[in-house]
Amino acid sequence: MLNRILSHDLPKSRWLAIALVIILIALAVAPFAFPGSKALSVAAKMLVFVLLVASYDLLLGYTGIVSFAHTMFFGIGAYGVAIASTRLGEGFGAVLAGLGIALVISLVLSLVIGLFSLRVKAIFYAMITLAVAAAFQTLASQLSDLTGGEDGLTFKNPGVLSPSFELFEEPILGVMVDGKLFSYYLLFVVVLVLFLALLRIVNSPFGRVLQAIRENDFRAEAIGYRTVVYRTLSNVMAALFATVAGALLALWLRYTGPDTTLSFEIMLDILLIVVIGGMGTMYGAVVGAVLFVLAQNYLQDLLKIGETALANVPVLSSLVSPDRWLLWLGVLFVLSVYHFPTGIVGKLRARALQRAAA
């Protein structure tokens, strides 16, 4: 049964399986096990980034396409929900209308980009997507009447997802059953279902063709596959999943703006997570997103503890200052690439294969 749910793509490593089970359980019980608004926000961001990075891995890891326009589709989903909610009023009808329009826009844009750009060489395609993403970010910042400009848009969620909504007057297991809790579990269920759908896609005959194109597109073309069509479909699918991820983030934050969805820093974060987790492994998106978001949010707290412990050591205390957290994040990334050149998931699976062969 589990094998069918995972589309016959089992972790193939005991340690990886344990890590995935721990992550699944931790995210499932996060509102009850990790009280506090920050911990819940970190868990919600993990869920969004799992879906966002997994959709990008469909492009980069499985098809071999380097695109810098992924955050554009992420932003389209967020802005679609935000604009519809501000214009049509709060309610699931507005959310669904905004998401539907965003999906159509992403479908058209990704199809046009795919058909007109995927015939060029990889580096030129990457530059084209970078230019399109930059143009879209500028457009979102300048159309202030529609998008709120640099300030973004703040909107109200449907009543049941609003923080002011409370199902019960008394907390259950120490947690209030309110709109924030419903919002979190909406994210959890949608991300879980769509992640399993992505697993199914990459392990289907369609996914095998994408991997063949990644390994040798000339050979794939020679045996009869229309590589441009498959690459375009991969581009469209990745864009649609990213659009849903953006909509989920907007629902969680009840706000969207250029910095939250369209920033190039987010694109760099996606690339880092894919490399850390392991390209061409959907499970790498899960492991990489969890580790990266944890480091991004709690590394400063750890450095603050280290700075206090080393207060009497002049040089070391300044090195572990919380203000230098980006430096240490970069060091951790370099170390992870050095010790896990194929990503954490790739390394764990390779070790499992070596042990099985021995």
Image (spheres, helix red, strand yellow):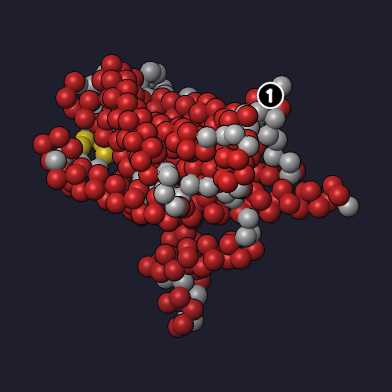
**Rendered view: 279 above or below 153:** below
| Residue at the far left in the pictured view | 145
Nearer to me, 321 or 103: 103
- Identify the image quadrant of residue 22: top right
Q: Is 250 on the left or on the right of 172, as rendered?
A: left
Q: Nearer the viewer, residue 81 or 33?
A: 81
Image quarter where the N terminus lies is top right
Q: Label 1, secondary structure: give it.
A: helix
Q: Is 59 left or right of 282, judged from the image as shown?
A: left
Q: Amino acid at mark 1?
A: Arg
Residue drawn 52% across and 38% down?
227
Question: Is residue 290 in view from this perspective?
Answer: no
Q: Which residue occupies 64% across, 63% down?
A: 339
Image location (x, y in percent) of residue 142 = 14, 45
- Please name the residue shown 59% across and 50% down the image: 278
Please say if 97 is above or below 330: above
Q: Which residue is mark 1?
A: 4
Q: What is the x, y in percent for residue 103?
A: 34, 27
Residue 67, percent across and down? 42, 48
- Would you identify the image quadrant in which residue 208 lies? top right
Query: Which one is nearer the viewer's eye here, 188 or 283?
Result: 283
Q: Is residue 244 left or right of residue 54?
A: left
Using the image, determine if residue 14 lies above or below residue 247: below
